[in-house]
Image (cartoon, helix red, strand yellow):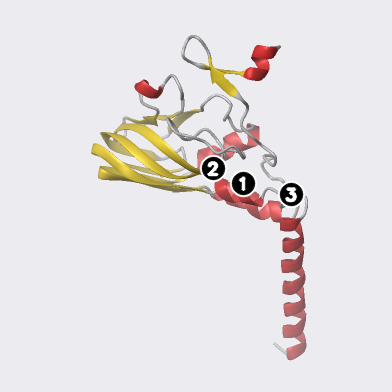
Amino acid sequence: MTWQSRARARVALAMALGAAACGCGGCGGRYFAEDLGDCLEATAGIGLPAYARVRVTDFAVAGCGMALSRRKGFHGRYGTFAGGGRSSSGGVGFHRDTIAQGGIPLVGNWEGAPRLAAATSRWSVATLGPCVTRRTYESGLEPGPRSAVAEKFWIGISVTALLSARLEFNPVELADLVCGCFGWDLLEDDGWNPRQAEPDRRGGWQDRAKKQQ
């Protein structure tokens, strides 16, 4: 490669990086922090007795054991946490979780809010066999249609044995982050915020907006 070719390649790279920087700082990049937060979930804490789970998307899940865990960590915007607080700016940030977990390999796996927390959270991820998964979200924290599809592509592990930890990554949300730098909202989730909700008399949750109608 001649010096002219190298120079042209550097100019093209600089232009591409400049375009990405402009995108991340412009309209498409106003939600960079939110999109970044949606790519990764990491929590750590304590739990008993013992449980382990591997997820390679919602179509390949294997869990074994049973545990109740109390953890703190970083989550995206959607209702994938239970029994803890949420930030006021879109649900991104550190949260505390109370998680019940149970699984039998090739039979099924379940993770979610324990029944004692059911009055304040309805989050759960239930898998029948190794590949039929259903996600339930806390009221007001449901993802949009495209993000609901992206939720099926989490990859990661969860382990509990006195200490408890969970680490997961979502490649589809990463694609949304990259596209957002160029002004394309791939998952149409820019500007998403939790709907306001409050407990009803039956112990569940309902939207204030619906109550006021």
Q: Are marks 1 and 3 in contact (CB under 8 Å)?
A: no
Element on which disc 2 rests: loop
Q: Which residue is mark 3?
A: 184
For the residue pair 201 and 104, the one nearer the viewer reads as 201
Residue 157 in percent (x, y) is at 37, 46
User: What's the residue type where badge 2 is placed?
Assistant: Gly
- Residue wearing tag 1: 34
* Residue at position x 64%, y 32% in the image: 145
Residue 196 image offset from top left, x and y in percent:
62, 25
User: Judging from the image, what secondary structure is the residue with disc 1 in?
Assistant: helix
Residue at position x 24%, y 37% in the image: 48
Q: Is residue 137 above or below residue 69?
A: above
The reply, left or right, for residue 107 in relation to residue 41 is: left
Between marks 1 and 3, how big is the CA–CA gap?
15 Å
Q: Which of pointers 1 and 3 lies earlier in the amino acid sequence?
A: 1
For the residues labelled 2 and 1, say whether their Cβ atoms are less than 8 Å apart: yes
Q: Residue extending furthest bottom?
A: 3
Which residue occupies 74% across, 49% down?
Answer: 184
Density class for disc 1 (Cα within 10 Å; few <14, some 14-19, many ≥20) is: many
- Residue drawn 44% across the image and 19% down it: 119
Residue 184 at least partly seen:
yes
Q: Which residue does the numbered mark 2 point to in the structure image?
A: 76
> Identity of the amino acid at label 1?
Glu
Give the foreground label among 3 and 2: 2
| Real-space CA distance between mark 2 and mark 1, rounded to the nearest whole angstrom | 7 Å
Q: Which quarter of the rendered picture does the N terminus lie within?
A: bottom right
User: Residue 78 location in percent, x, y?
Assistant: 55, 36
Label 2 or label 1, whichever comes before in sequence order: 1
